[in-house]
Amino acid sequence: MSSSPCRMTSYRFYTKKAQLVFSACQEHIGQRCEVNCKECNKHVCLKCIVSGTHKGHDVEELTETHKNKIRKIKSDTEEMRTKLIPKYQKEDVEIRNKISKTKSKVDDLGNESKKLRTLWHQEVDNIFDKIDSLSQSLTEKNINALQEYHNKIKDLISEMKKIVKQNEKLFNSNTLSEVNKYQSKLNEYQAFPEHVDLELPSLRSNIDPGKELVIEIGGYGATLKQFSQLSLSVNVSCLATAIGKLMDQVRVIATIPTNHKRLLGVACVGGAEAWIYRNNKTITRIDIHGTVRDTVTTTCTCLSCPGGISVTKGGELIYSDYFSGTVNIVRDGKSETVIIAPQGWTPWRLCCTRSRDILVHVYKGIGPQSKHNIIRYQRQNIKQEINKDGQGNHILKDGGNPLFMSENNNGDVCVSDLNADTVIVVDNTGKVRFRYNGTQARREKSFNPRDIVTDSFSQTIVADINNNWTRTDNF
């Protein structure tokens, strides 16, 4: 260290008023653009006006143009901050309340359905399963519509706040070109989004003990009639139902371009959007026209990630990360870890249930010797493991392929086991209901299942890549 004494030097600072920066004229060397051509909306020099291409055009001093732009920016910003943002925030609160009230009405509908169900004989359980399935489907349609509208309102609020911050930076900007680039979007946000109209289903019933029981919901109905056979002394129940059947001909309602050469997975967001991904660390949200609405960059450290994706009941995206051994949720564009796989196990495919649980397919080992397990998580806690039947036998075959999972309206977990070329259905207790290996279809090629989904009637639909078709079974 130096032993010389420290010296202090005083400086005097002068404050200068910011000067406007005039750009150089591209047509006349050495000239500065000091005026704005109103006809061409372009900064030009005096020579351009006197003898150049802008001769005879109406012009305005750039200092005045700058002042006018600044006034417009301040006016737009003030209206967004004091009027539009509070208006949208008020709508945000009202939508939250509507969602809460809608869920409450749905709960009341479910309770009424349970009371009516006790009046019917055991053999009508299948009818009520279909009724509950349709009710859930109609309810989800309303909730999804409200959720989409809610997300739109939140996105618009976020956009306007971002514009306000950008505009505030322009207030004191002395760069003419930056200020002149400003394009007002006030008209876009003044056109308030249309409200969502709800069409909640009503449950109607006609109970005449000893004669006829009728229940209807959303255009579907079931009737239980009772009569006596002449040769028998007991009453026999005769069941008639108007529940719809599968269409004879499959109808394509939309073909959505993705620009992905190899699409690895799809997770629906409501009825008009979906998250899709391939092995490039990113997950993309597209609408039914293929337009990209959002892109999420995952925390994955390799190109083969993510391993799987799904969407929660609240509409939030989750994905699995092989290398970190975690399941992450995306909130406000950022990834948060919600599940850490048990030591030695790696998370792969995912499925969000109606009860807000998360089913995680985990594996350990390499290639044909890999072991598989399905874990049901309630928040971050393990609630159930699905891997063995009542006799202790493994129900999932060893192998290097993933498991695809889906839950039907009965709470059954439907698993497409690629290693066994089999679909396995287990109830909510983990008991195996049955297995399906495709032999019933009598196709020329062997059954080779892939992704699996269920519809509002608890029917299971599985893709069969060997036969280039989808199989539908009423599980």
Image: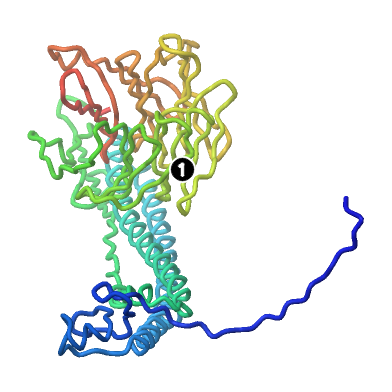
Q: Nearer the viewer, residue 267 or 116?
A: 267
Q: Position of residue 330 (x, y in %)?
A: 46, 47
Label 1 amino acid?
Arg
- The image quadrant of residue 64 is bottom left
Q: Quadrant of the C terminus?
A: top left
> Is residue 7 shown above or below 70?
above
Q: Residue furthest right?
A: 3
Q: Position of residue 445 (x, y in %)?
A: 16, 12
**Is 71 in front, or is 228?**
71
Residue at (38% x, 29% y) in the render: 413
Residue plotted at (47% across, 16% down):
388
Q: Relative to 187, is 341 on the left or the right? A: right
Count of marks, rendered view: 1
* View extreme (front): residue: 30
Q: Which residue is identified by label 1?
A: 356
**Of residues 328 and 168, the one drawn nearer to the viewer in this rendering:** 168
Query: Relative to 55, is 299 above or below?
Result: above
Q: Is residue 146 visible?
A: yes
Name the residue nearer the viewer: 288 or 70.
70
Q: Quadrant of residue 421?
A: top left
Q: Could you say where residue 44 lies in the image, as x and y percent from the top left?
A: 26, 80
Q: Position of residue 6 (x, y in %)?
A: 86, 64
Q: Residues within 10 Å of mark 1 (few under 14, many from 20)?
A: some
Q: In the displayed structure, does residue 259 sit left or right of residue 113?
A: left
- Relative height, residue 137 to residue 92 (above, below): above
Does dot 1 land on a helix, a strand or a loop? loop
Question: Residue 272: in sight, yes or no?
Answer: no
